[in-house]
Amino acid sequence: MNQLPNCSECQSKYTYQDQEIYVCPECYYEWSIHNSTDHLIIRDINGNLLKDGDDVTVIKDLKVKGSSNVVKIGTKIKNIKLLDKPDHNIDCKVSGFGAMRVTALFVKKV
């Protein structure tokens, strides 16, 4: 039997396939089969493999584009989501800043 991925929003194991999408019956999240991040290999600065839902820590001060604010070194980012992008490949919410994208080379896995 083919193993279906867990829901990337609530981590439920009860997902099912409906034609070209996966559906989570617990939180009603839907995502494309073609946008699944199970095939992604993204590593942090230390070479640790990252996956959706991991917690990471910022390893250097990061300037926030379009703002004079800075995300300070040591800031903890919870529940990341991986993106299939060449540069900013982590989608996350940073406390005090909101939603943003970060490069995996500037974080380490907690």
Image (tube, grey):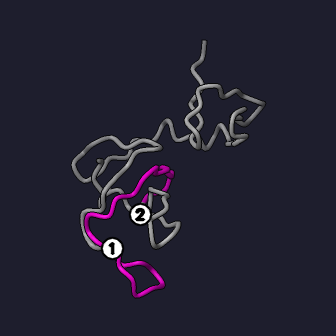
Label 1 sits on what residue type? Leu
Report whether 9 appears left or right of 95.
Answer: right
x then y, percent, for residue 77: 39, 57
Residue under numbered circle 2: 102
Residue under numbered circle 1: 62
Q: CA distance from mark 1 to mark 2?
A: 9 Å
Q: Residue furthest top?
A: 1
x then y, percent, for residue 97: 47, 73
Q: Is residue 51 above or below residue 13?
A: below
Contact flag, marks 1 and 2 (Cβ < 8 Å): yes
Label 2 sits on what residue type? Val
x then y, percent, for residue 17: 72, 28
Please tell me whether mark 2 sits on a helix, a strand or a loop.
strand
Please tell me whether mark 1 sits on a helix, a strand or a loop.
strand
> Is the stretch drawn in magenta largely helix, strand or loop?
loop
Query: What is the span of residues highlighted in magenta in the rendered image?
Result: 62-86
Magenta includes 10? no
Instruction: Please tell me which of labels 1 and 2 falls first in the chain.
Output: 1
Q: Alpha-carbon neighbours of circle 2 within 10 Å: few (<14), some, or many (≥20)?
A: many
